[in-house]
Image: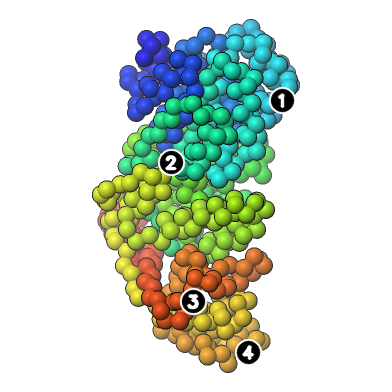
Amino acid sequence: MSESALAILKNTFGYDTFRGFQEQAIAEVLAGRDAMVLMPTGGGKSLCYQIPALARPGVGVVISPLIALMEDQVEGLRQLGVNAQRLHSGIDYHHQIQVEQALLTGHIDVLYVAPERLLTVSCQRLLDQVRVNLFAIDEAHCVSQWGHDFRPEYLQLSRLKERYPGVPRIALTATADQRSRQEIIERLSLNNARVFIDSFNRPNIFYRIGQKKQARQQLLRFLQKEHPGDAGIVYCLSRKRVEDVARWLSSRGTKALPYHAGMPAEQRKVHQARFLKEQGVIIVATTAFGMGINKPDVRFVAHLDLPRSIEAYYQETGRAGRDELPATAWMVYGLQDVVLSQQIQSRSTASMAIQRVEQQKLDAMLALCEVTRCRRQALLNYFDEPLEETCGHCDLCLEPVKTWDGTEAARKALSCVYRTGQHFNAAHLIDVLTGKKTAKVIQYGHQHLSTFGIGQTLSITQWRSVFRQLVARRLINVDTDGYGALQLHPTCKPLLKGDQTIHFRKDRYEQPIKGKAEERAKGISDYLHDFG
């Protein structure tokens, strides 16, 4: 390792030693060779290109997909005394000219650019006039069509090898399964690059996934019980839900701010700045927020809606506990999340091959939710990192989930789907099973079916659990009509005919809070309880 690299680590960034394989990755780039780095969020990926950019003569060019990410990283470097700048659509023409002049006169060490800007003729002509010492392709999973944040512009970044053949390239990401890793290498022409893969295990994060029942109340109880006054991120699927949840949390005494792509840019910037600088601010956001945000003391990440893949879930939860102190990844999900996810996936306009992969990723996410063994083992296995022993630091390790023989209930549910013509959603099917003569049941004459009233031994909540788990296991499909009609999948036939048995997990919900002090005093085992 070069003396200058170690000196930069100490004098500029304030660290005495390198972590993991940072030293080896930096050495590759300093030697002028390509590299690919997979390192979990908070693991120090940025140093793998920032230090070589400062150690080598010239300017390091970093391709970054989000303006917020660029702004945060540039600001962080400038506070450390590094001459860093950015070029993206959010800066005005006068500022752009200033940045270009500073670049041409050698007054910029690290330049962040959006992929769309980099690919323009004018930007490439600008870079032709300076000495580029490396190209860092951040969030490299965006190049993969199998990934969770695919960006078409990233596909064209392979041109860098032809246009700048002597300039080393380093691709970096926190989340990529084996298929995505291979595509990153192929798409970016990194066949000769050395690949560095760090452990995906974040032992300081406690993983908890529960069933949804009055989600906002569940979230508030979680915050009051485990993270009063802490900074955190709450992820929601839609912009409207973000606004509603932020407003509702604020009315309950928390410092909750919304963040989504539909907000004015200036307001997003203000909310992000408050989150980074103030204590105890909660950001309620769509996935538009968080990529590259360097806030070490995020104590929790909560999901009120189901992420579309384990990669997305891992990346988002990885924004918690970057200071390596205890943090929580908390999520609630329910039947409607599963139905909605299936509908979104089924409406994809991608090729059939990509749709199959999208379905596999959704199935893997649902499997993580429904797993009955160690949550961390299941998560790490997805990234081809087997964990031999159970972690002892997740919800399922502290309170193993109970299961029950759901064969009879499943056969009743499947029969009801079939006998109602496979045209109705779970709510109507449950009305039929529990013998409710609603207007809709009477309208279609379903009170005369053999399945009418045969499910009165289970509650509505338990029936919703049955249907959720049948959909999650792909024994039932969700129609794309927008109404969530449930349809039989061919794989359900052995179960329906009685040739197969099935066990379901017993759902667990939070107990009502009687008082904040009393609730905090109770152990984590009081957080969840079994129904039935």
For label 1, the residue is: 120
Mark 2 vs mark 1: which is more N-terminal? 1
Mark 3 vs mark 2: which is more N-terminal? 2
Outermost residue toward the top in this view: 105
Between 380 and 167, the one lying in front of the other is 167
Mark 4 vs mark 3: which is more N-terminal? 4
For label 3, the residue is: 493
Q: Residues within 10 Å of mark 4 (few under 14, many from 20)?
A: few
Mark 1 vs mark 3: which is more N-terminal? 1
> Marks 4 and 3, how far apart in space?
26 Å
For label 2, the residue is: 318
User: What is the three-letter code of the residue carrying label 1?
Assistant: Thr
Q: Position of residue 171 (x, y in %)?
A: 51, 29
Q: Position of residue 295 (x, y in %)?
A: 45, 33
User: What is the three-letter code of the residue carrying label 4?
Assistant: Gly
Outermost residue toward the front in this view: 192
Mark 4 vs mark 2: which is more N-terminal? 2
> Marks 2 and 1, how far apart in space?
33 Å
**Tag shown at residue 30:** none
Q: Quadrant of residue 402?
A: bottom left
